[in-house]
Image (tube, rainbow, N blue to C red):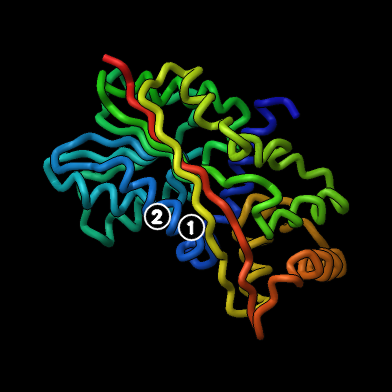
Amino acid sequence: MDARLQRRVQRYGWDRAAGHYTRYWRVQLAPAQETLLAMAALTPGERVIDIACGTGLVSIPAARAVGPDGELLGTDLSDTMVESARAEAARADLSHARFERMGAEKLAVPDAAFDAALCALGLMYVPEPLEAAREMRRVLRPGGRAVAAVWGARDRCGWAGIFPVMDARVNTEVCPLFFRLGTGSTLARTFSAAGFADIDTVRISTRLEYESEEDALGAAFAGGPVAMAYARFHDRTREEAHAAYLETIAPFRRGEGYDIPGEFVIVRGIRPG
């Protein structure tokens, strides 16, 4: 798919998913997000940019970590995600956190403006991840650190069947190379190619626990990257897709719910200075 069209699909797809994202993914993504924040080691007074911030699951704790003397800028391609994150920050009384819509490959911010750049589970959706990594480097001051988390290898993510299930029913082109950055050392090599130094990698196994079929289906279809295509399905097609996906995760059934394996890869790099 053309990169411009890919970005358009991502933008409006995540607009669709925004209202369901926190409900279905807050707990499941926490291990990756907590590791990312630990590796970022934010301190009071720092300036931080959270790229592909979504509903603010990382932005809010990052803003708390830097405190009122610091600054948090959250960016996302989706207007609805930005609005959700902005509302969360307002509820948390974090006036030093602001949110703007912009793409990861072209950040509308000055050079060397931040102490830390974060990207939690967004980089694998970007058509040109190397360009996004270069942008992370550009906006960091010398010595600043960038930390990104992505999903790991396909064969270690038990929910990966959602993609062939959708592709059998519609040409979604949501993310043809979704697992590329989590395979081997690809993410670390991307950081190296972008000009980062002192690169560290952490790979963690996790479990995605859902209490019911409804929750597992909601996460996969309504709250995830296929939300836009799913919204166009007729009831019969939805039922068929639900049944097909549940079959792919049947080995992970635990009572009424599911315990689905997953993997995250988190990489930190330093801008040389």
- x, y percentage for residue 217? 68, 68
- Image marks 1 and 2: residues in contact by CB distance under 8 Å: yes
> Quadrant of residue 137 in the image?
top left
Query: In this orientation, which residue lies closer to the viewer: 113 or 267?
Result: 267
| Tag 2: amino acid | Leu
In the picture, the quarter occupied by the N terminus is top right
Q: Residue 10: x and y, percent?
A: 62, 41
Q: Secondary structure at mark 2?
A: loop
User: Is 34 above or below relative to 117?
Assistant: below
Q: Quadrant of residue 89?
A: bottom left
Disc 1 secondary structure class: helix
Q: CA distance from mark 1 to mark 2?
A: 9 Å
Q: Is residue 138 left or right of residue 16?
A: left
Residue at 21 percent of width and 49 percent of height: 65
Vertical side of 82 occupied by 106: above or below:
above
Disc with the residue nearer the chain's start (1 vs 2): 1
Say if residue 115 shows up in the picture: yes
Quadrant location of the C terminus in the rendered image: top left
Tell me the kind of residue under disc 1. Leu
Does 140 sit left or right of 108 as displayed?
left
Residue appearing at x 28%, y 48% in the figure: 62
